[in-house]
Image (cartoon, rainbow, N blue to C red):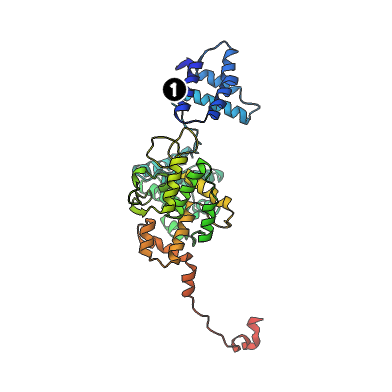
Amino acid sequence: MEEKDIQQLIGQCIAFFQENNYTWNRISVYKTLWKRGIVSFMEARGLTVYNTSIGAMFIETCHHNGTIRHQEREKIRSIQVLDDMLLTGFIRKRCITPVFHRLDGEIGQEMEKLVFHLTDMRRSPVTIGGYRLYLSEFLNHLGAEGVQHKEEIAEKHIVSFVLAHPTNRVNIVSALRVLFRFWKEEHILDRDFSQFFEAFRVRHPERIPSFFSRKEVLRIEESISRSSAVGKRNYAMTLLASRLGLRASDIANLRFSQIDWDNNLITLTMQKTHKIIQLPLLAEVGNALIDYLRNGRPGMELDQVFLSSRAPFIGATKSCVCTAIRHAIITSGVDVNLKHHGPHSLRHSLASVMLHKETSLPVISESLGHRNTDTTMTYLKIDISSLMKCALEVPSVAGGFYTQRGGAFYE
């Protein structure tokens, strides 16, 4: 078992904090937590050498009647920091552990075979995670219906499960269709549900992209305070979405090597489509990036332009970008009722402006990095002014139409 003198271990942690640009205030907080927490705990027991078992013993004292208060949560974090340094030589960034959806029991084990198959087919982790989620929920539904064996699954169980999810039926039916087709092809289940799914089709609901007017977009941009490092970063992120139409994943993964300052160009490979696009580095966007790089970005030698706002500093993630832009939109005061309000809404807004300026669809498609213009056709739904030009006049109806048969049908 790894062990080390507690004061020496704390010294290593402090050195790591300093090297990774932790604030002095945060370092002082950890010093106090260790002094009043684990150090006091060990001194009371005549201990000077720390190991993970001692840390676990201390954590047990942080629970009060099954609950953990904020101060105790901080003490537990201070122990996790010590354990990281002791076992790995560095401190991991605090993160939320994603939920893992288990597929247990006889039916769950057969569902796992589909997950393994999708992994072998090199489907993306996001796609596989979606399948695991839907299959896990279906497994729980079967359990609630008393179904323990795959041979007992009937059409009524599928229907009742789908009807219980009114907002996501398309993806759920698709996942179940793939599951039962895989079971049939692999001779896991003899029954063929293909005709059932052929008849049980769920149509994609008509979706109109959420967007903001040019005036609202300007209001969102101007509402972001640039007095802090985080504000400078979030402002630059927002402009990349609103002025250039970049997706959150492309903003998060923007590299210094992709920015040509001399020719005012940004050249990158889009994360979603793997398409290489070249965009102009507009003056407003360039100035926002320079302000962040000079006055807001931590001095870390990472190729990613945007970094996390807290030490230890790592490259920004898609979630980080979405959260920052969503917060900017909400706090700006623009009307978000019945609207999606994330980075994609700013991308839609840019498309709306381009359509209003009568930009051709191929140009819009190239600017937004779509694979083809069919995807761009979606934005025609939000070009209200052009749609109005296509409206036909309602033909006049003779008065006798409403009075026929004494007007019995129109009372």
Crowding around mark 1 (Cα neighbors within 10 Å: few <14, some 14 to 19, many 20+) is some
Q: Which is more toward the observer, 207 or 85?
A: 85
Callout 1, which amino acid? Leu
Residue 80: percent from left, percent from top: 51, 26
**x and y, in percent, of residue 404 in the image:** 61, 88
Give above or below for 409 relative to 152: below
Instruction: Say if 392 sits above or below 248 in the image.
Output: below
- Between 375 and 286, which is closer to the camera in this rendering? 286
What's the residue at 45%, 59% (across, down)?
Answer: 350
| Badge 1 element | helix
From this viewpoint, which residue is outermost toward the top? 46
Q: Is residue 179 visible?
A: no
Point out residue 229 in the picture as x, y percentages from the top left corner: 50, 41
Q: Residue 112: percent from the left, percent from the top?
A: 42, 40
Q: Which residue: 49% across, 44% down?
A: 232
The answer to whether 321 is drawn above or below residue 368 in the figure is above
Would residue 402 be found to the left or right of residue 389 on screen? right
In the picture, measured across the screen, residue 92 lies left or right of residue 339, that is left
Name the residue located 43 percent from the left edge and 49 percent from the top edge: 287
Tally of marks = 1
Q: Nearer the viewer, residue 245 or 215?
A: 215
Look at mark 1 in the image and give the residue it sits on: 87
Q: Tell me the quadrant of the picture where the C terminus can be found.
A: bottom right
Q: Residue at image x 51%, y 18%? A: 53
Q: Quadrant of residue 356?
A: bottom left
